[in-house]
Image: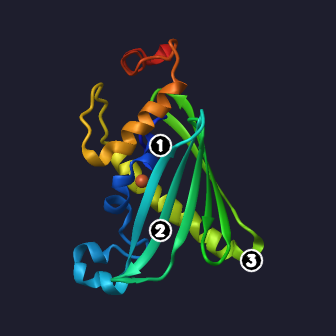
Amino acid sequence: MAFAIKPLDIPENGADVAHLNPVHSTSLLTSLGNKYPFLLNFVGQHTWAAEWLRGEGHTARMNLTHRYKFGKLSVFQINIVADQNGPGHVRLRLETGFGPVLISQSVTPIGVLQQRVVHRIYSPWYNAVIAAAFVPGESYMFERDMAIWNSKRYTSSPAYVKTDKSIRAFRAWYSQFYSEKSVSFKDATQNPLDW
Ligand SMILES: [Fe+2]
């Protein structure tokens, strides 16, 4: 799937705590629960709780809890600590109950509104089956975000609602990575050859 976004959009996804349940709750096993909500007790869905915290200097942290739920029955809890190091790298440490998994994510701008995103997944050998399941799982979840990024529009003075509190804090934190010489969104999109 093709998509055109700014480097900021990808790590901002972590600070956009309010999008997690609306976008990422549909089961990776089947989307039947969306069509027939009464089936959610049988097919289950992902639920998320998260907080984004500004760290020292170029760092930030997101604490995330994932639960796979059949109604009120929670079966697969994953506790995640995601450390953001600068604008282009995130390291997620997952405690899955079967063992640890480490996911390394990098974002490298390669052109106007073009990012190269690389996710690498590591685990001890005894947890390799769970870690391998994260490869398609991560990419399906990422595609859900891409569908939103594809229709995102730039607004110079966006209005924030209460649940956007952490997005606002994220953007204030991210502003340290721009300099006086940073090309503006307008110049980058109007003169793409000068980028
Ligand atoms: Fe997302």
Name the residue tied to disc 3: 126
- Up/down of 64 relative to 150, above or below: below
Label 1: which secondary element? helix
Name the residue located 46 percent from the left edge and 61 percent from the top edge. Answer: 140
- What percent of the width, then of the height, locates residue 35? 23, 74
Closer to the camera in the image, 51 or 13: 51
Give the crowd class for mark 1: few <14, some 14-19, many >=20 residues within 10 Å. many
Name the residue tied to disc 2: 66
- Up/down of 17 relative to 44, above or below: above
On the question of residue 144 being in view, the answer is yes
Report, in whole angstroms, how far the alpha carbon at label 3 lies from the one at label 2. 21 Å
Residue 41 left/right relative to 64: left
- What percent of the width, then of the height, locates residue 141? 45, 60
First in sequence, mark 3 or 1: give its number.
Answer: 1
Q: Amino acid at mark 1?
A: Ile
Which label lies toward us, 1 or 2? 2
First in sequence, mark 3 or 2: give its number.
Answer: 2
Give the crowd class for mark 2: few <14, some 14-19, many >=20 residues within 10 Å. some
